[in-house]
Amino acid sequence: MKNFNLAKKMLALALGVLMLLSVMTGCSKTNDQAGGGSGDTQQEQTGALLKKIKDSGKLVVGTEAQYAPYEFKDLDANFVGCDMWLAQQIADSLGVQLEVVDMSFDGIIPAVQSGQVDLGIAAFTNTPERAKEIDFSNLYETSAQLLIVKAGNADVYSTKESLAGQKVGAQKGTIQSQLIQSALPDSELFELEKYPALALEVQNGNIAGLVVDQAVGESLVATSNGGLEVSNFAFTAEEASFGKSVVIAKGNEDLVAAVNQVIDKVTSDGSYQKAYDEAVKPGYALRRVPHEIHRVYRDHRTAHRPVPQLL
């Protein structure tokens, strides 16, 4: 009898376990399906981004405005530079106002993904790794990279061997960081949030040099009061020839097409080249933007190369 009662208890326990597992499995499937539904809704919302931009009457662009001549600010704190000119062309083509949000470079792609901003325009290098996370527009410029060193060190740091064991700087989250790791494996990567801060580290002798787009490097040298110069070191074309694109959240083919239409136009008619040439002129940042060019400023911060070849 005891054995019979024990068997009944064991059977009841087994049935209870099976029922519990069934409920858990059902919950798991429900949660998975709910998750899929949420993803579909997010995809629908993402696909409606172009409509949202037109309905709101503004295009919100994320950038990092300390990267002249691409994006920086003039005396009136207006956003200027050839990338900001491109952003204005895109906004104009959509018939909306341009709003620019200044933030850390490595926060722009997450901001695009989350919908905090509509586009990311900040001299973004088009890479396969980034393309897994976001969509890229067509290329609007290609550029080589320079090693910027302290004045007098152009020949001191002119080979990979001379840079072995030395600290070489790049902005955090940029393709230049990856370039240093791949092309200069015997050097030590040194990262900061902003290139002006990296330039000071070079001038003070704390790091051997920094790697940057040619136009930006030349701008840093020109404004260093003789403290910096371009090294005689050169990356090969295979190591460093980077194309720049606009960053767009995945699932917005209509917005990608609209952006590409503008890029194809300004690269083929030479107007982007003209904007670039204007932005690299000495004293460009000291000019004042005409009042009819309206840009809203919001600061979200808490705290490359031969003359461009257009494609």
Image (cartoon, rainbow, N blue to C red):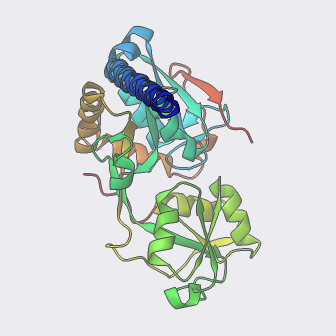
Instruction: State the image coordinates of residue 254 (x, y, percent, origin top left).
Output: 25, 25
In the displayed structure, 229 sits above or below 121; it is below
In the displayed structure, 197 sits above or below 153; it is above
- Residue at 45 percent across and 33 percent down: it is 113
- Residue at 66 percent across and 59 percent down: it is 223
Q: Nearer the viewer, residue 85 or 127?
A: 127
Residue lying at the far top in this picture: please name it: 55
Instruction: State the image coordinates of residue 124 (x, y, percent, origin top left).
Output: 43, 48
Q: Nearer the viewer, residue 307 or 110?
A: 110
Res 128 quadrant in image:
bottom left
Residue 251 placement, left or right of 174: left
Res 262 quadrant in image:
top left
Residue 113 placement, left or right of 226: left
Instruction: State the image coordinates of residue 151 (x, y, percent, origin top left).
Output: 67, 77
Is residue 289 visible in the rendered image? The answer is no
Res 52 quadrant in image:
top left
